[in-house]
Image (tube, rainbow, N blue to C red):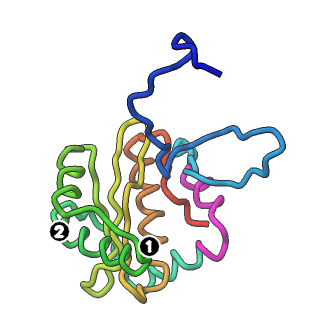
Amino acid sequence: MPWNISEISVVDTIIPGSNNAIFRTYPDGACAAPYGSYVLDLRQSEEMLWKNISKKTRQNINSAKRSGVAIRDAGKFRDDAYKLIVGTFKRSKLPFMSGGSFKRIIDGLGENGKIMMAEYEGVAQSYIMFAVSNYCAYAIYGGNVEGQQLGAQKLLIWEAIRSFSQMGVKNSTFMVPE
């Protein structure tokens, strides 16, 4: 059957959905599986945010605090963050972007780009890079050392939640400590 040119749509580029796309729908009859970003309302009280974290994760966070894990702004440690994130991806046998690309992302975000770290006894345990606006804080990339101090990354995520909430950010889409 010949094609009628009036029925053909010209496609210049096809771009697949990114791995962090959020879809709230699925085809009839499909089995839906939770996937994508979890949106957390940061306008809740700190007590409510804390209450919604599982008991075991709260215990891990408290253990990290007691053991001396410190959370800090790590913008000046961008190169160290990059190396740790690359190492995390390598352990998972995944490729990661070049250092120049990583630098362009964080530099391009300007004041809206944040890197936070969990540190134990002077050694970085975990880094997370965030993009932050008044509307939402997005975790872009993160990495951990092998055998990190118990609860270090969970404490980092909790402190990021607290920090962004106090800044007046309305939502977050980063992983929530269970």
Between the residue at mark 1 and the residue at mark 2, the CA separation in whole angstroms equals 19 Å
Residue assigned mark 2? 79
The quarter of the picture where residue 133 lies is top left
Q: Examine the rendered structure and indicate whether residue 111 appears above or below residue 52.
A: above
Mark 1: amino acid: Gln
Q: Give the residue displayed 65% in from the left and 59% down from the top.
A: 52
Q: Examine the rendered structure and indicate whether residue 61 appears above or below residue 111.
A: below
Q: Give the residue displayed 50% in from the left and 43% down from the top.
A: 17
The quarter of the picture where residue 110 lies is top left
Q: Give the residue displayed 59% in from the left and 73% down from the top.
A: 57
The numbered dot on residue 153 is 1
- Stretch of the chain drawn in magenta: 45-57
Q: Examine the rendered structure and indicate whether residue 46 appears above or below residue 77.
A: above
Q: Examine the rendered structure and indicate whether residue 43 appears above or below residue 46.
A: above
Residue 73 rendering spot, x and y as whole percentages: 26, 62
Figure quadrant of the N terminus? top right
Residue 165 rendering spot, x and y as whole percentages: 45, 47
Pointer 1 or 2: first along the chain = 2
Residue 169 rendering spot, x and y as whole percentages: 42, 41
> In this view of the protein, which residue sits in the foreground, 168 or 140?
140
In the structure shown, which secondary structural element does the residue marked by tag 2 occupy?
helix
Instruction: Tell me if residue 82 is in the magenta stretch.
Output: no
Say if mark 1 contacts mark 2, CB within 8 Å: no
In the structure shown, which secondary structural element does the residue marked by tag 1 occupy?
helix
Residue 84 rendering spot, x and y as whole percentages: 29, 75
> In this view of the protein, which residue sits in the foreground, 129 or 55?
129
Mark 2: amino acid: Asp
1 vs 2, front mark: 2
Q: Give the residue displayed 25% in from the left and 69% down from the top.
A: 81
User: In the current view of this chain or complex, which residue is farthest to the right?
Assistant: 29
Figure quadrant of the C terminus? bottom right
- Disc 1 crowd rating (10 Å Cα; few below 14, some 14-19, many 20+) is many
